[in-house]
Amino acid sequence: MAEVLDWRADPDPNALLQRVAEVLHSGGTVAVPTEAGYLLIASALHGGVETLRRIRPDEPLQLATAGLDEVAGWLKTRGTLTERLTRRLWPGLASLSVPVGERDRAALPGGVNDRLIDGEGRIRLACFGHSAYENRLMHGVGPPAFVELPAGGRFTPENLRERHGDELKLILGDGEIASKRLTRVTVTGEGWAVERHGEVSEDEILRSAGRWFVFVCTGNTCRSPMAEGLFAARLAERLNCRVA
């Protein structure tokens, strides 16, 4: 039966996360709180991934990253669109399915190559901002693979233990949390598509994927709005579309 630790009550969070790291290093599976709700995680390097697949056979395995800096070290052929989306949507409730090139496979940790790249040569990446997740202690055992719990459900350490106590080794509790659906985005070259709709809207992705131009003046409030208006008009003319 899963061990339960209370993230909110313990005065030494590092000791809790050290325990999480120990379980992951031994190949165990853990429930951890994030802004998306509780996620079920296992180390991509040390095992436990097959347990995640048994718990949620209908869900794809995804990789929880430390953000753009970590992804930049792995994916040398990621492209500017992937950079923009990771920089603007993370940490948050969107995951990205991105292609993995041959050069990238050499940079990715071995367990990731073996367990998390799908049959189409793609990997799903996410990044979270919960206080437990932001502490990088648990990442000393390698990047965690995760599966989501059903969206809309309200999960507590107690009902997680009832449902998955035999498969999980540890539950890092943070009270009752409603599960939110991650928006899954597929990136192909410099294009993208929503694979599954979730908390992040398509408009937000569209804005995050775009190139941003900022006009600033220091003298008055007229020059930068005028520059913006002229630029928008010229751009619309070039693209043969309306300014809006």
Image: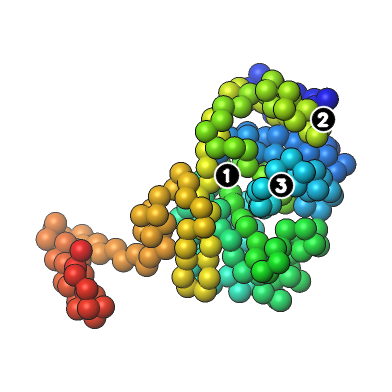
Earlier sequence position, callout 2 versus callout 1: 1
Residue at (80, 25) in percent of width and height: 3
Residue 214 x %, y %: 29, 63
Residue 83 relative to residue 55: left or right: left
Q: Are marks 3 and 1 in contact (CB under 8 Å)?
A: no
The quarter in which the C terminus is drawn is bottom left
Q: What label sits on residue 94 in the rendered view?
A: none
Determine whether the residue tagged by mark 3 lies in a helix, strand or loop: loop
For badge 1, the amino acid type reads: Phe
Residue 111 x %, y %: 80, 58
Q: Are marks 2 and 1 in contact (CB under 8 Å)?
A: no
Q: Is residue 143 above or below residue 158?
A: below
Residue 210 relative to residue 47: left or right: left
The residue positioned farthest toward the front in the image shown: 58
- Residue that numbered label 3 is attached to: 57
Residue at (47, 58) in percent of width and height: 194
The quarter in which the N terminus is drawn is top right
Mark 2: few, some, or many residues within 10 Å (few <14, many ≥20)?
Answer: few
Residue 208 relative to residue 86: left or right: left
- Residue that numbered label 2 is attached to: 166
User: In which quadrant of the rendered view does residue 107 lie?
Assistant: bottom right
For badge 3, the amino acid type reads: Pro
- Residue that numbered label 1 is attached to: 128
Determine whether the residue tagged by mark 1 lies in a helix, strand or loop: loop
Mark 1: few, some, or many residues within 10 Å (few <14, many ≥20)?
Answer: many
In front: label 2 or label 1: 2
Mark 3: few, some, or many residues within 10 Å (few <14, many ≥20)?
Answer: few
Residue 64 x %, y %: 65, 49
Residue 48 appearing in the image: yes
